[in-house]
Image: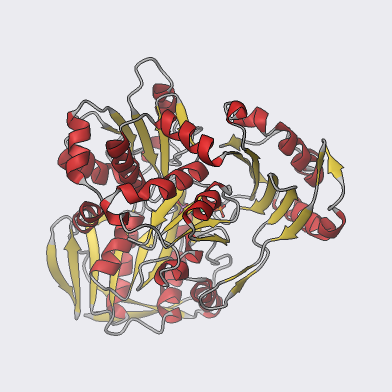
Amino acid sequence: MKVKTVSTKPIDGQKPGTSGLRARTKVFMGTNYLENFVQSVFNAIGGLAGKTLTLGGDGRYFNDAAIQTILKMAAANGAARVLVGRNGILSTPAASAVIRNRKTDGGIILSASHNPGGENGDFGVKYNIAAGGPAPESVTGEIHRRTLEIDSYRIAEAPDIDLAQLGETQTGDMTVEVIDPVEIYAGLMRSLFDFDALRALFASGFAMRFDAMHAVTGPYARAIIEGELGAPSETVVNAVPLPDFGGHHPDPNPVYAHALMEEMFSESAPDFGAASDGDGDRNMIVGRNCYVTPSDSLAVLAANAHLAPGYRQGLAGVARSMPTSRAADRVARKLGIGAYETPTGWKFFGNLLDAGMATLCGEESAGTGSDHVREKDGLWAVLLWLNILAVRRISVARIMAEHWAEYGRDYYSRHDYEGVDKQAAEQLMSDLRQRLSELPGKSFHDLTVTEADDFAYTDPVDGSRAEHQGIRIFFGETARAVFRLSGTGTVGATLRVYLERFEPDPERQNDEPQSALAPVIAAANEIAGIAERLGRDGPDVMT
Ligand code: VG1
Ligand code: CO
């Protein structure tokens, strides 16, 4: 095998964000862009000599070419073995499962997740560590440092590998093992859930719609929900992954998964609906006439997880990202288990899961997961819901009503201002930061600020610290507004405003969230001066 050392220069902006490096697909396809970043990853982890890697992606445009490049670079950098999903496909949770099950030294996942794909969409690269989860800040920081000093990369001059055939081939001294993308993952799901009970549920006529949004979960959902659990063949829709996700935004929320929402709120709605995102780590849960917010979903799963075999022993603790509503904390308190609040992004859950401090984790952005892998896992969340429904045999709406009656309801919404001027957004945040100490005691739209801070987190396991993780404004015990800038966008900036209010009274738990939150929304807008500073009348997306 001939190895080429190619001279290169650092490229601006190769700083991993909330979840890996993301950029426009055309930027990734530009000269040395992918190669620089991948070589920087290899450099940051002390080289690849003798190591094994897991490799796969969500199938978006450029996935296949990028995989061939990375294989050649891995061979040139001395890797011993790379496990690749057939046709280059691995969902993010499946990649995590493969890293753990086959004990590879780490993995590379190609995805920009919920961002649109295609030649004019986005592409991304994430590096996961041997525990199976996203690289922690110490590693992503080192990767970034390496991108700033890179002067060459190594690549093998070798033919492309046929990734359509399962089995092993050699590239020089490196073995490429093409694996079934579903098998290890499906085995893990079988070990956690009562598949017999799920089969009985579907056999009883329980109807479900799963919208794979033309993204990577299609093949997984088909194999498990239709194949193993016997759901009718029309259960999974948009099941064939497309390089541009059919031109859609593969983000499972009521705005982008509106077709599913319409069906679930129609006369002929099935019992249960779900959707997942580009790389299969997010989930949306919706019952007949009943949308479940991700924050509520985490709380319901925590309260009911013991009904599934994999969690029969109970939970060690529940962790949520800071902007996620405090509904899960109420369940943890009742169960007498730990509740943790981490910065946004799955990488912050890894230590809690490794240390056995948390069993379930979740984010308001539709990510839920457990210690079975080290990523959020869309299909897992759907199967856990199904297992709970199979045991309780009541509707999703009934589950929610009972949950709120017991714990109270946390009205919740996130307002996104997308593609706004970066400078204006950064200025808005820094001005807010400056004013934090003067806010308490002031009133806005009948709400009085009691506390305001810039969220910082000290990891309880390794003591590492993350600062400036979002501005929290508390209005007493019950209401809160949070402001942060997105770390996954590729154009301009996205301001996220997270709004919540607790309602303990069952008589008042049936309002429409935007109206129930109206005072918090008005106060948040006024405090930050959103309209004047960003020149926007309202958010682009409300979830
Ligand atoms: C968003 C979400 C965050 C999630 C991240 C990656 O980040 O808010 O909760 O972990 O996406 O999800 P940000 O920085 O844009 O708010 V995924 O499914 O895109 O890997
Ligand atoms: Co995702």
Q: Is residue 249 left or right of residue 161?
A: right
Question: At 30% from the left edge and 55% from the top edge, which residue is drawn?
Answer: 312
Question: At 40% from the left edge and 54% from the top edge, which residue is drawn?
Answer: 369
Quadrant of the rendering where the N terminus is positioned: bottom left
Quadrant of the rendering where the C terminus is positioned: top right
Q: Is residue 512 left or right of residue 252?
A: right
Question: From the viewer's perspective, is residue 415 above or below residue 152?
Answer: above
Can you tell which quarter of the image residue 228 is in? top left
Q: Nearer the viewer, residue 68 or 445?
A: 445
Q: Nearer the viewer, residue 436 or 275?
A: 436
User: Residue 490: x and y, percent?
Assistant: 56, 52
Q: Is residue 190 left or right of residue 513?
A: left
Q: Is residue 113 visible?
A: no
Question: At 33% from the left edge and 39% from the top edge, which residue is drawn?
Answer: 212
User: Residue 13: x and y, percent?
Assistant: 58, 65
Q: Is residue 394 visible?
A: yes
User: Residue 279: x and y, percent?
Assistant: 37, 50
